[in-house]
Amino acid sequence: MAQTLRDFLKQIENLPPDTLLCVAEVDEAFAAHVAEIEIIEDAKAQNRKTEGLEAVELGNGRERVVVIRW
């Protein structure tokens, strides 16, 4: 199932604010620095399961999503 911002914030609530934020694919040994964080107001969920590579269409919808680009 897709993770919500509430779920994410709960997982990191006790971390120091200077903790490095990176992104990586599942089972990767290395992570990349975040290049940009973008809030999309008109996204459309395609698949709420974690198995899909293209889970959200960044337009043509009515859902808000946070996109972390690397």
Image (spheres, helix red, strand yellow):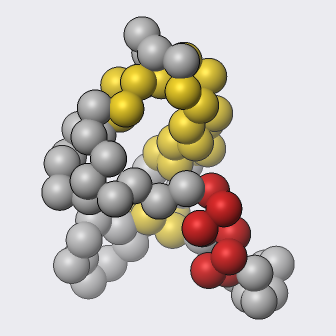
Q: How many marks?
A: 0
Tell me residue 64's x, y (percent): 59, 31
Which residue is drawn at the image coordinates 66% and 62% (left, top)?
6
Residue furthest to the right in view is 17
The reply to whether residue 15 is visible in this rendering is yes
Q: Is residue 13 above or below residue 25?
A: below
Residue furthest to the top in view is 60
The reply to whether residue 40 is visible in this rendering is no
Which is more toward the observer, 47 or 36? Answer: 47
Which residue is drawn at the image coordinates 18% and 48% (left, top)?
52
Tell me residue 9's x, y (percent): 69, 69
Which residue is drawn at the image coordinates 47% and 45% (left, top)?
69
- Taking the image as shown, residue 19 lies to the left or right of residue 33, namely right
Q: Is residue 21 above or below residue 47?
A: below
Which residue is drawn at the image coordinates 62% and 22% (left, top)?
41
- Taking the image as shown, residue 67 lies to the left or right of residue 56, namely right
Q: Is residue 26 above or below residue 35?
A: below
- Taking the image as shown, residue 39 lies to the left or right of residue 25, namely right
Tell me residue 24's x, y (percent): 35, 67
Q: Is residue 51 above or below residue 14?
A: above
Question: Within the image, what quadrant is residue 13 found in?
Answer: bottom right
Tell me residue 40's x, y (percent): 58, 27
Which is more toward the observer, 52 or 23? Answer: 52
Q: Quadrant of the N terminus?
A: bottom left
